[in-house]
Amino acid sequence: MAAEDSNLNKNMWKKIMKFVNRTCVKASFEKYYEKILQELDHFILFDAGHILEHNDDQDFSKFITVNIDYEVIDEYVEHFQYIDPLKNCIFDTPSALKSSLVFDHRSWRRTNYFNNFLSPNEFYYLCGVDIHYRGEILITITLIRQEESGDFSTAELLFLNRVKTSIACHIHLLKKIHPQSLSDQKYINIKYRLSMEKFDFTPREKEVACLVRSGQSNLEISEDLFISVNTVKKHLQNLYRKAGVSSRQELIHRLLEN
């Protein structure tokens, strides 16, 4: 038994070192997040996944996804994040967790969140880890499996816990390498403003577009701008039409790429 445990530990550390070596890349934040998900799939099989980047206000500033449509992300940001029982229980925690450790699946399947969001998208088992650097939350990694794929194992959670420090340190390094990358709000604001001018947004549409980028829901935008939710939706439709997109995430990407 001791020999088996020793071999298991050796195999785990080999996997950890392989992951660390493969993800020590000089890249933009977006490319680095894509690389994390790409490499994680070699060690922890998953059907869908995403990395969300947190800004200073603890809002979501960017989603990088695998096998998740932008429309699904919009639904989560608009409504389902507010009834997400996992977010309420485990947000900003130091260790990797999975949904079946937080809720028994009999109770889990009875929640509105499961029945109205997870199940229609064929999401069943979830696991994830918050990445911190010196107490500051940087990103959240979430991996998702369908029911037939089975639950995540304790060993897979252990793997996430072992690689999170390397990920945190590399994000901190990238912030120094790329002072004008995604973390430089001044650079982003200039790029965003120029794109809004290019698409001929009205002053009110520019306000809505900026609040969309900060991760605010339709209700939050309506409260900030003292307009109705229906008016916010009309502005969003105008923004989508002018930018040639169909969702919030596509709008943000379009404005940042132009």
Image (spheres, rainbow, N blue to C red):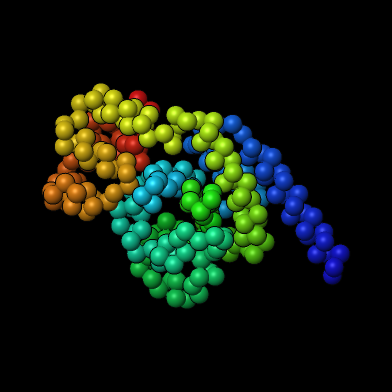
Rendering quarter of residue 96: bottom right
Q: Where is residue 60 in the image (x, y as percent from the top left)?
A: 38, 48
- The quarter of the image holding the C terminus is top left
Q: State left or right for residue 108 relative to residue 252.
A: right
Question: Residue placed at 19% from the left, 46% from the top?
Answer: 233
Q: Position of residue 251 (x, y in %)?
A: 32, 36
Q: State left or right for residue 95 relative to residue 4.
A: left
As rendered, which of 53 and 150 lies closer to the eye?
53
User: In the picture shown, does residue 169 fall above or below 184?
Assistant: below
Question: Residue placed at 70% from the left, 49% from the top?
Answer: 16
User: In the picture shown, does residue 164 fall above or below 173?
Assistant: below
Q: Is residue 207 at least partly visible in the picture?
A: yes
Q: Position of residue 27 (x, y in %)?
A: 55, 31
Question: Residue placed at 18% from the left, 52% from the top?
Answer: 223
As rendered, which of 162 and 229 lies closer to the eye?
162
As rendered, which of 119 and 56 lies closer to the eye?
56
- The quarter of the image holding the N terminus is bottom right
Q: State left or right for residue 153 relative to residue 217.
A: right
Q: Is residue 255 at least partly visible in the picture?
A: no
Q: Where is residue 104 in the image (x, y as percent from the top left)?
A: 50, 75
